[in-house]
Image: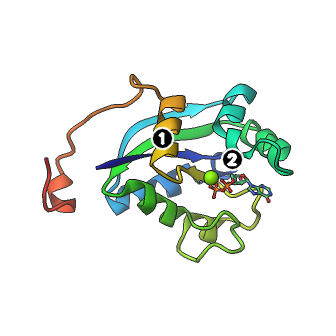
Amino acid sequence: MERTFVMIKPDGVQRGLIGEIITRMERRGLKIIGMKMVYVTEELARRHYAVHEGKPFFPGLIDYITSGPVVAMVVEGPQAIRVVRDMVGATDPLKAAAGTIRGDYGLDIGRNLIHASDGEDTARFEIDLWFGREGIITWKRDVDRWILEKVE
Ligand code: IDP
Ligand code: MG
């Protein structure tokens, strides 16, 4: 079982797409084990996007991510990191495949609706940054046996 960090960015929240996006993940069978609405501070934004510091789009990215509330989540499932990245689609919505979240709802790389961790180390770092240990809810989901052949 793998955990990944997902964030519905301010444009997703403003456009009323929180439900659409969460519904896709629920329908896939992914399990939400952490969720909160957050006004991202500049400090959190800079830490979250530290790897992009110095790039030309960095100042705009910090403005964007701090421009309104976001919905932050921890999502669990088999190969959840890759599965969610595949559902999210390419960084530039103009290049994202139809059927992906960015490919279905976006048109601009600077307004691409959603963030998802891109690997195991990033997922660990981001879950810790946004939720710590207390923020994670471990709960038993009764429907799991209809989604996964083998449930622990
Ligand atoms: P990702 O979100 O698909 O992992 P990254 O390359 O990690 O994409 O970039 C992080 C975020 O920075 C993107 O989701 C997007 O919001 C923003 N971004 C990346 N490249 C550009 C750009 O060229 N112009 C504007 N914003 C960008
Ligand atoms: Mg990234």
Q: Position of residue 62 (x, y in %)?
A: 77, 39
Crowding at label 1, few (<14), some or many (≥20) Cα neighbours within 10 Å?
many
Q: Residue 14 carries which label?
A: 2
* Three-letter code, disc 2: Gln
Q: Nearer the viewer, residue 120 or 22?
A: 120
Q: Residue shown at 37%/31% (left/top)? A: 136
Q: In the shown orientation, is residue 86 left or right of residue 68? A: left
**In the rendered view, would you say 19 is above or below 134?**
below
Query: Badge 2: few (under 14), some or many (20 or more) residues near its Cα, within 10 Å?
Result: few
Please tell me in which quarter of the rendered image ligand 1 is found. bottom right
Q: Which amino acid is tagged 1? A: Met
Corner quadrant of residue 148? bottom left
Badge number at residue 73 = 1
Above or below for 108 versus 51: below
Instruction: Residue 24: tell me if it is visible.
Output: no
**Relative to 107, is 126 on the left or the right?**
left
Q: Which of marks 2 and 1 is nearer the N terminus?
A: 2
Residue drawn at x 46%, y 39% as measured from the top left: 124
- Please tell me in which quadrant of the rendered image residue 65 appears: top right
Visible in this render: residue 2? yes
Q: Residue at x 82, y 44 (%)?
A: 54
Q: Distance between the residues labelled 2 and 1?
A: 17 Å
Give coordinates of residue 70: x percent, y percent: 62, 39
Image spot of residue 121 (x, y percent) = 48, 44
